[in-house]
Image (cartoon, helix red, strand yellow):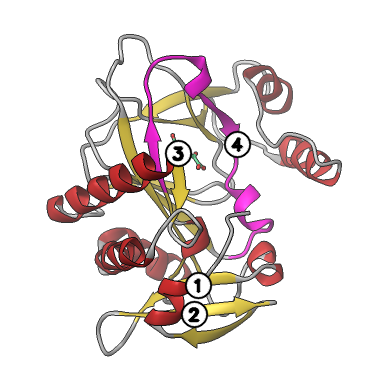
Amino acid sequence: MPYFKMVRQALPAKTVADARQLANDVCRRNAVGKFSVASEWTNATERQRALGIAEVFLNGPAADLFRSRFDVEPALCLNIMTVRHQAPEGAAEAVGWHLDLGFVGDDSPFLVSWTALQDVGRDRPGLEVCVPAGSGHNLTSLLEAWRQRRLSNGSLVFDDRDLDEHLGQGGWQARVAHATEGDAAVFDQLVLHRTQPMTGVFQERHSIEFRMMSLDALPMYQRTQTAIFAQRSTEGGVRLYKAVNGNPLTMTLDAFCTLEIHAG
Ligand SMILES: O=C(O)CCC(=O)C(=O)O
């Protein structure tokens, strides 16, 4: 069963403003619409700023959802802590239906917190979520298609016709998640979501995605790549980890800030 919940005030106003500023600085300097915190797009100062944002997030209500759902301390995977600028204009800006399964590869404990950095859903594009029109979704057929596409290096993005085919015509609906700044849509790797141009929406939007997992049960992709994590420390602040082949070892702030890593 896919898991989805709206969380109000996942980030407080001051942190939202910091994150928006960071998004603007990095996107403008690199001329990109999306970047990962642990990647070639960020410099040492920006990584430290991002860690400050991560620390606030880890002490907030969305991280508590992970704790209560999986009974374990969440670790944020910084390679896929992504910040996004969404232009409103047209189809070129669309992101089609997809699953965050594409970031992890299996059903290990995982939640993404898609966090709005402005009010979205009316004047700025919001995230659209696929919800069942009836009693529930049977994802078996869609997940099988996903696996086949993955094996053949096909597109992991689906269109409305694909959803009709796999979920049944009239069996699903697209719903825009309305959010005020700092609110988050928290969901697992089985929730279909997308961003489409919305009628009458002409303002840009920024968002930040925190992807939470368990260091003791890393998903398949994080076990097979070099992955960087931030976790709340019992002494306060955050502790950093670098996992090579699924074996997380602590790393220093300096090592994180100077690490050369290329977004996959
Ligand atoms: O921010 C958006 O509009 C969508 C981004 C998204 O769905 C993703 O990166 O998985």
Q: Nearer the viewer, mark 4 or mark 3?
A: 3
Q: Against 27, is 253 above or below?
A: below
Q: Nearer the viewer, mark 3 or mark 2?
A: 3
Which callout, 3 or 1, points at the residue further toward the start of the chain?
A: 3
Kind of residue at disc 4: His
Expressed as whole percent of the image width and height from the top left, the position of residue 142 reads 72, 35
Kind of residue at disc 2: Tyr
Q: Nearer the viewer, residue 104 or 66?
A: 104
How far separated are the C-alphas under marks 2 and 4? 28 Å
Q: Which residues are magenta?
A: 83-108
The answer to whether residue 103 is magenta is yes
Q: Residues within 10 Å of mark 1 (few under 14, many from 20)?
A: some
Which callout, 4 or 1, points at the residue further toward the start of the chain?
A: 4
- The C terminus sits in image quarter: bottom right
Whether pointer 4 and pointer 1 mark residues with C-beta atoms closer than 8 Å, the reply is no
Q: Residues within 10 Å of mark 2 (few under 14, many from 20)?
A: many
Residue 259 is labelled as: 1
The answer to whether residue 147 is magenta is no
Q: Quadrant of the rendered structure where residue 164 is?
A: top right
Which callout, 2 or 1, points at the residue further toward the start of the chain?
A: 2
Check the image and name the residue furthest to the top.
200
